[in-house]
Each structure stands twice: as C-alpha cells, then as structure tokens.
Amino acid sequence: MASRKVLSVIRALRRPLSPLLLLLLLGPWAAAGHAGKYSREKNEPAPPSKREPAAEFRMEKLNQLWEKAQRLNLPPLKLSDLHTDLKIQERDEFKWKKLKAEGLDEDGEEEAKLVRSLSVILAKYGLDGRKDSRVVSSNFIDHGADDDSLEDPRLEKLWHKAKTSGKFSSEELDKLRRELQHHKEKVQEYHALLETLGRTEESHENAIGPVDLSGVQAEALASRHAELKDRLRNIGQGFDRLRRVSQQGYSAETEFMEPRVLDLWDMAKSANFTEKELESFREELKHFEVKIEKHNHYQKQLEISHQKLKHVESFGDQEHITRNKERYAMLEEKTKELGYKVKKHMQDLSSRVSRARHNEL
C-alpha cells in the first residue's frame, strides 16, 4: 500500500506543473518577476533618446563657420552657395590629409592652397570678422533693386548705363547683372588671395634670423605670384568686355549666356587646345551651361519659397506653415546638391584649361 502511494507521488512529480501551481510554489519572488515581465514599464516603448542633430559637415571648423553664417542671417541663396563652397573645401581637406599621410606634400604647397581657399570663403561671405567685408546678397531675383550693391563705383556706373540705354531686353539685363556680380566676386577672391600671400611673405620677413627658403618653397611662392598676375589680367580683360557690352549691348554672335561659361570659353580659346579639343570643350561647356541654368532655376524657386514661407508664418496657419516648410526644405536640399555639382564641374573644367595653358609654356 505504501509502495503504491510512493509510485503515485513519483508519477505526479513527473507530470509538468501548471503555470499557476508553479507560481504558487516559487513564492512572491517569482510572482514579482513574472508580473514585471508584463508590467507597463516593460511593455510601453521607452521615450526616444534625445540625440544631437546630425552635423552638416564632418569637420568641426566648417560646422562652426556654417553656424556663424546662419547666425548672421545670410539670405537663403547666399547660404546655399556657402554650403557648396564648404563642401568642396571639406572634400579637398580630406584629400590633403590622405596626401599628407602618404608623405606627398612635403613642401606644404597643397596645405597652403587649402588655407588660401578658406581665406577666400571667409572674405566672400563676410565670415572673417571684418565689418567692411560683409558681402551684400548676390540674389539676382530682382536685378533692378538698388540695394543689391555691386560695391564698385565702376561696375555701378556700367550697370546704370546699361539699364538706361534701352539696348537690353529684361533677359539680357538679367544676364548682364549676373556678369557684373560674377566680376565683383572675382575681384573679392583676388584680394583675399593677395592678402593671404602678403601674410605668408610677412611671416618670413618677421621671422627671427634669416629665412632660407628651399627651392621648392621659393618656387611655390613664385607660382602664387604668377597665379595672382594671371587672375589680375583676367579681371582686367573681363572689365573691358563688360564695358563694351554695357555700351553696345549683346551681339547676336554671343554663344554662351552664363558668366562662368563665358570665362572658361575665353580662356579655352587662348589655351593650347587643338581644333578638335577646342570643339569638344565647347560642347562640354554647353552641357555645363544647362546644368548652371537648372541650378539658377532652383535658386529662384528657393527664394520665392522663402518669401512665401515668411508670408505664411505671419498668419500663423500651422497647416500652411508645415506644408511650406516642407517645400522650402526640399528646394533647399536640391539647390545645395546642384550647387555642389556645378562647383565641382567648374573645377574640373578649369583644371583642363589650366593644364592646356601650362602645356603652352
């Protein structure tokens, strides 16, 4: 009889316990743990962690410049252009870091180029801390506005003469205004480069003891002087051309409309291109001009969207504000993307012309 009871207990222990019985046997600790698994704290999603917004650039110094520009309330088109220039600067700086790691910039000339290009950016967008160097907006939506100063009495005189001559259509006035603005920017870049070179030479002169420049360093300085001389000659030729255009109007033979394309074409014609190479370059410039026109279109749409957003925000209609903000963000991103592609294409074409001109020497 006793053996039967023992066998029944063993069989009972072999059977799996129900969850409720197991919970009662294990006591309050298991109950607490079991309840915790299905508690509100365990099942409600945790609040999202507060992350810092993604940085615009990978380099901290460029992020600082970008933030400073936003604090200065630069107009949207100027911000878009700055974004492009900073992206190009960042790309070039990472390329230089790779060169330096491989020991391919022993003379420091590539590093000096980066310093010069950053100096140009600082001067161009008024980020160098100088009150008198702040660049007036280059937005060319309303070219008739007198507050969009060209900052050069000679350019202002040419613009006034062209506006009052009656020789230009509205499209041609747009084109001339862009050319004048482009010329102003070339002059600003020249002065920024001149100042950078002056600081370099001054540091050599003020160094304690004689400075013995290596042959490579002396050649680099000579190259910078040659570059400045070339830029100054190009500026002079550009101004002479603008003076002729403002007096006579555009001729029917004018092949290109965009100032940057015109500059490249003028330089290409005087470079050491064969007839076939020059024709190929001309065709590529046509494609480049289309790309610039597309960028110009998005720039105009971005400016219109910016004005509309400011108008909608003044009425406080949240639905309209949200919709206009989304459109503005989309246009802003597209404008930045196209700006980068245009600037990169411009650099590639300029390099080709430069190589051809050097081969001529």
Image (cartoon, helix red, strand yellow):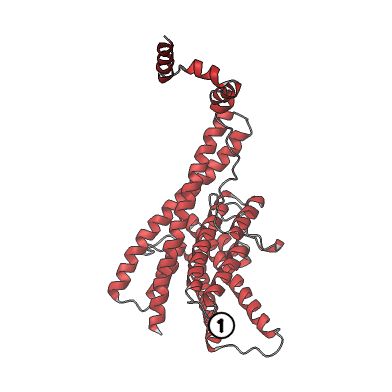
The one nearer the camera, 263 or 3, is 3
**Residue 50 vertical position relative to residue 127 in the rendered view, above or below:** above
Q: Which quadrant of the structure image shows residue 9?
A: top left
Q: Name the residue: 38% across, 56% down.
A: 290
Q: Is residue 167 left or right of residue 69?
A: left
Position of 303 with respect to 338 (left or right) is right
Whether residue 171 is visible, yes or no, is no
Q: How many marks?
A: 1
- Residue assigned mark 1: 221
Residue ranking furthest to the left:
276
Q: Name the image quarter holding residue 208.
A: bottom right
**What residue sits 49% from the left and 62% below the top?**
91
Quadrant of the snapshot with the C terminus: bottom left
Quarter of the image with the N terminus in it: top left
Mark 1 burial class by Cα count in 10 Å: few <14, some 14-19, many 20+: some
Q: Amino acid at mark 1?
A: Leu
The answer to whether one can see residue 40 in this image is: yes
- The percent position of residue 232, horizontal first and vertical second, equals 54, 76
User: Residue drawn 57% across and 59% down?
Assistant: 59
Q: Secondary structure at mark 1?
A: helix
Q: Is residue 318 left or right of residue 21?
A: right
Please state the horizontal and vertical placement of residue 25, each as a whole percent of the image. 54, 19
The answer to whether 22 is drawn above or below residue 173 in the figure is above
Residue 228 in picture, x, y percent from top left = 55, 77
Residue 199 screen position, x and y as percent: 65, 77
For residue 205, above or below residue 325 = below
Front residue (pair 48, 78):
48
Give me the residue at 32% from left, 72% from top.
278
